[in-house]
Amino acid sequence: MHQKTMPEISAKHHPVHKLVREAYKDQTSLGWRHAIKGRISTKWSQAQHLHAQMRGSNRPAQGNVIVRLIWTAMNGLWKERNRMEHGTTEEERALNAVARMNLRIKVAYSKK
């Protein structure tokens, strides 16, 4: 796996910044591929909650906003990928199916 450097997070000793740095390190040990699937460090929620508290927000907790944002983004990517792969009209779907079949035929004949 590639060794990535930690993005610049303010070096201030602000409690939220400290939690964000801890969350980043925690997520790195859990794995960023898991984050895409919604499996994220609990420290992200702690940082989010502390930030809201410090801003004086008295809105009730809405669950983990980060997981919802990740899911929404991944769902949008999945729908776009399907649109590109399969098309949106019957004509596009038929053309894409023919193109995929032609590719499989070329691959099969190239192995002989």
Image (cartoon, helix red, strand yellow):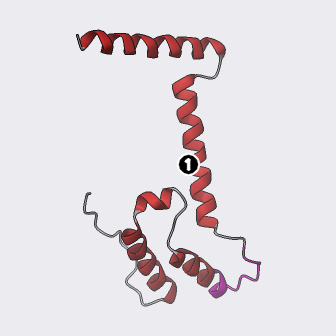
Above or below, comparing residue 44 to residue 36 in the picture: below
Which x, y percent locates residue 100? 45, 16
Q: Main secondary structure of the magenta part?
A: loop
The type of residue carrying mark 1 is Met
**Residue at 56% over, 40% down:** 78
Q: Residue furthest left?
A: 112
**Residue at 59% over, 81% down:** 51
Which x, y percent locates residue 72? 62, 52
Tally of numbered tags: 1
**Residue at 58% over, 22% down:** 87
Above or below, comparing residue 94 to residue 47 in the picture: above
Q: Residue furthest front?
A: 112
Which x, y percent locates residue 65? 64, 66
Q: Helix, strand, or loop for circle 1?
A: helix
Judged left or right of residue 71, residue 30 is left
Quick one: 21 or 78, which is closer to the camera? 78
Is 56 part of what is drawn in magenta? yes
Above or below, comparing residue 6 to residue 85 in the picture: below
Residue 50, by quadrant, is bottom right
Quick one: 26 or 6, which is closer to the camera? 26
Above or below, comparing residue 5 to residue 42 in the picture: above
**Magenta segment boundaries in residue numbering:** 52-61
Which x, y percent locates residue 97? 52, 15
Q: Quadrant of the C terminus?
A: top left
Label 1 environment density (alpha carbons within 10 Å; few <14, some 14–19, many ≥20): some
Judged left or right of residue 23, residue 78 is right
Q: Quadrant of the N terminus?
A: bottom left
**Residue at 66% over, 86% down:** 53
Judged left or right of residue 41, residue 72 is right
Reading the image, the residue beneath label 1 is: 74
